[in-house]
Amino acid sequence: MRLENLTKHYPGAPLPAVDGVTMDINAGELVVLVGPSGCGKSTCLRMINRLIEPTSGRISIDGEDVTDIDPVGLRRKIGYAIQASGLFPHMTVAENIAQVPRMVGWSKKKVKNRVEEMLDLVGLDPREFHSRYPRQLSGGQQQRVGVARALAADPPVLLMDEPFGAVDPITRDHLQDELIRLQRELHKTIVFVTHDFDEAIKLGDRIAVLREQSHIAQFDTPEAILTNPADDFVSGFVGAGAALKRLNLTRVRDVEIADFDTVRVDDPLQDIFDKLRSGDANELLLLDQQNRPYKWLRRGDLSRVKGSLARAGTLIHDHVTRDATLRDALEAVLTDSSGRVAVTGRRGEYIGVVDMETLLNSVHEMLEADRLAAMEHRHSLEADRARRTRAAQEGTFTTSGEAS
């Protein structure tokens, strides 16, 4: 995709809302537009599928100018997900997801299969959610359905306008992880708008930091922006704690996920007692009937068990997926008294655990790598400065920097 000198000037406004944006987005890349409120990032996004018509400039997808395409037909080829999901309240989940495939003429059987495939893809059981209405879903479930609907007709391009901005922080983290997993499987070209720089770091292959009127302050990888912000404006967006923000660049799947002794709520109580008493560790992970993390059980909890586990153990309030960042995992560990966090699959099923020691070792390795990179950069600058000094002393360069 290429945006070329893209401009939007509303009648009567003294300045353009978007002024001359030029940007190349590679196939299969997730690019995040981030900037202050009112800088025009959503306007840029909506010009791509012509929900807003550009005043001037060119937008091309696979070399085809989108201004030469019927706008309704164009929008059916581009997925679009927005904040608060935008689902039709009078339609079931299945009908919402099926909307675009039906419009483009898919057969009933193909649409039905696609709806089930999409629900499974976003981690919702088709048997449970197929006939529900949006009002019967949580905010996170609605957003998952919104993403499923945007992907239903298998568009090559997906536009996402602050899609996770209206949900609570824990749900937002899980939805971000889900998008990362989906992108790893589907390799769509995604343009994602947010005002949250941490979200941009976590999701983006590249980030475009936008000033007023969508002037590009820096367009680079998250690593490059964190380590070498282009100017004070970008530094202000990065904010304090750039080293900690780098924790958003490493995933749980990149570190060791350990196994842990588990039992299930439907195991015989005596078996649970025996395992807890005889095990090397003084703690077990209790799974529910769907193999999802439920409680931490400790030996000291045995005295509270009187024919039931209802009052025993400590509830698990948070878990992470393999696509979660080390920052997500560290926050979960710090808020959990066990010193570790459970790692789960796409339907919440238990996979393993990551403990504090593993996370701290990863942080130390990251900081050491940053320190070595900074030293190498400094030595390179010093060597370059020394070469220039020698050249000047030998009369090779004039004070203007031209060959003498």
Image: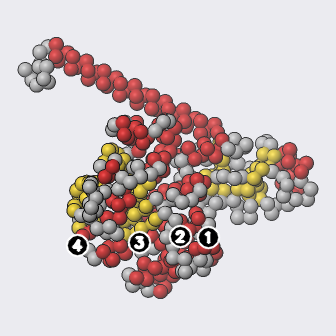
Judged from the image, the secondary structure of the residue bearing numbered disc 2 is: helix
Judged from the image, the secondary structure of the residue bearing numbered disc 4 is: helix
Q: Nearer the viewer, mark 1 or mark 2?
A: 1
Indicate which disc residue 137 carries.
1
- Percent across and percent down for residue 31 are 38, 54
Judged from the image, the secondary structure of the residue bearing numbered disc 3 is: loop
> Mark 3 is on which residue type?
Asp
Indicate which disc residue 68 carries.
4
Q: Which residue is mark 3?
A: 154
Q: Is residue 227 left or right of 213 when viewed as pictured? A: right
Identified at 70% across, 61% down, the residue is: 291
> Mark 2 is on which residue type?
Val
> Mark 1 is on which residue type?
Leu
Does residue 271 appear in this view? no
Does residue 177 appear in this view? yes
Q: What is the distance, in whole Å, between disc 4 and disc 2 at their CAs? A: 31 Å
Categorize mark 1 by other alpha carbons within 10 Å: few (<14), some (14-19), many (20+).
some
Q: Are marks 4 and 2 in contact (CB under 8 Å)?
A: no
Judged from the image, the secondary structure of the residue bearing numbered disc 1 is: loop
